[in-house]
Image: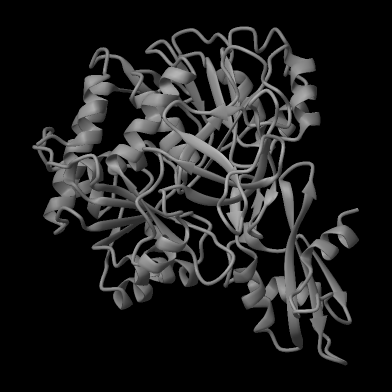
Amino acid sequence: MSNHLFDLIVAKIPDPEKIFLQTLEGDSILYRQMLSASARYAHALVKLGVEPGDRVAMQMEKSPAFLFIYLACVRAGAVFLPLNTAYTPHEVGYFLSDAQPKLIICDPERADSLSEAAKAADARVVVHGHGQYGELYDLAAASPPDFSNVARGPDDLAAILYTSGTTGRSKGAMLSHDNLASNALTLVDYWRFTPEDVLIHALPVYHTHGLFVATNNVLLSGGSLIFLPKFSGPQILEAMSDRPGKLRGTVLMGVPTFYTRLIDEPGLTREACARMRLFISGSAPLLAETHRAFSARTGQAILERYGMTETNMSTSNPYDGARIPGTVGFPLPGVALRVADPETGAALPQGEIGMIEVKGPNVFKGYWLMPEKTASEFRPDGFFITGDLGMIDDKGYVHIVGRGKDLIISGGLNIYPKEVETEIDSLPGVIESAVIGLPDADFGEAVTAVVVREKGAAIDEAAIHAALRDRLAKFKWPKTIHFVEELPRNAMGKVQKNLLRATYGG
């Protein structure tokens, strides 16, 4: 039996001496070196007691080693669990207690703060420095450069990614080898990736977009990465330029914030983008005005697509043909998509707004240790209920018109209001709160809190932010806090967040 995902990756390598990854400065890692590094890390994981099916959590800054450890988990038959580097130890504690990983791999600076949560979850803290040091690095460096891959079939788990919801805590979406492999192969074909492509990678690597959509597309096309630590307009423009002895980018994947900020760069011109093949946007809705402004500056139309943690990518605007602002294109080959009545699941006619539901090899296997929640999110015929409201127009393009769930997407990151509300509501002097997302030109949506204080309470915006500092990642903090006498409610007593959005949206 083969290792489904990794065998496909190896089969797509055009030449072991080809550059897999290069930094902006020109330091290169060849495919041959990627194979040996991932083998060494796989040996290290086994030495640390990791067995097939074990979860391996990681909260580490972006580096080539991050990708090698991800691939090592695949090769060792483990289940990779990447965690946002902005998460506090309090938040990480929940993920560890839920997933029960064998290891939590982290930067040295995090080891002490994570030790208590790791001990409670019976997980071992293993350190890996950003450079060439740390327990995990030392174990890998002392290991052989080849590894006998653990047999894994298409339905075996490759990763668990935690995703936000509207009630309760985050849920672990279980992604199989074939969920990842089939979606990447589809996108490679649909977006015309070849071994000649060089993807400018400025995304985080702890979620679907940067880790699976970007990296797996390169791996399964035999292309190359220009690996940037984070978004930087000047660095992206440099990566797009001719630089002697260095790779030149042909594709950029980003969140809408990338494009709003690139538009502000004086160096963004038609000439600068002339040798770029494709600009892709996802993780949050791209404003039509951003689409038009970018096209006017560069002569190129951004390709917007639609997906989520549970489904990988489900739709895309066409590579050839009109990329229409405000739409997310057509269902990808092999993906069935329908717009349904949210209550009954009955398919609605073209042009009517309803719940987007999808089915295909891209759709996850369910939520970790939540069989009842999993069952409630699928229709009897196997369609997954995305929670997003949309419609299909007369040309077949899919439009996302809103979310049935109150999820906020800010800068491409999911924020679940209930979690923020719970923390605010626990503060002395607060009666209750409601957290909403409001349009923001830079981040897509800005987290906004509307708070009801106890009579005479002195708590203010600064005090709330100070209290949240050690409880929530900074990207979840409300950018604005409004204080009101009471929250608007309907006849059933439910807070009417639509009225709050209308009141404060201006």
Q: State which quadrant residue 15 falls in.
A: top left
Give the residue displayed 66% in from the left and 38% down from the top. 349
Give the residue displayed 37% in from the left and 58% down from the top. 108
Query: With 104 as the anchor, is 283 left or right in this view?
Result: right
Give the residue displayed 33% in from the left and 71% down from the top. 118
Q: Is residue 177 above or below residue 81?
A: above
* Residue 120 spot, x, y in % from top left: 32, 78
Query: With 465 as the anchor, is 35 left or right in this view?
Result: left
- The image's colour scheme reads one colour
The total of numbered circles placed on residues is: 0
Q: Nearer the viewer, residue 192 or 239?
A: 192
Instruction: Specify whether residue 183 is in view.
Output: yes
Query: With 133 as the anchor, is 306 left or right in this view?
Result: right
Query: With 22 as the anchor, is 102 left or right in this view?
Result: left
* Residue 27 spot, x, y in % from top left: 39, 23
Q: Nearer the viewer, residue 96 or 22?
A: 96
In the rendered image, the quadrant that contains the N terminus is top left
Q: State which quadrant residue 233 falls in.
A: top right
Q: Is residue 306 above or below residue 237?
A: below
* Residue 253 spot, x, y in % from top left: 55, 29
Q: Is residue 444 above or below residue 296?
A: below
Instruction: Specify whether residue 469 is in view.
Output: no
Give the residue displayed 68% in from the left and 81% down from the top. 425
* Residue 277 spot, x, y in % from top left: 56, 12
Q: State which quadrant residue 279 falls in.
A: top right
Q: Nearer the viewer, residue 137 or 312?
A: 312
Q: Nearer the viewer, residue 402 or 113?
A: 402
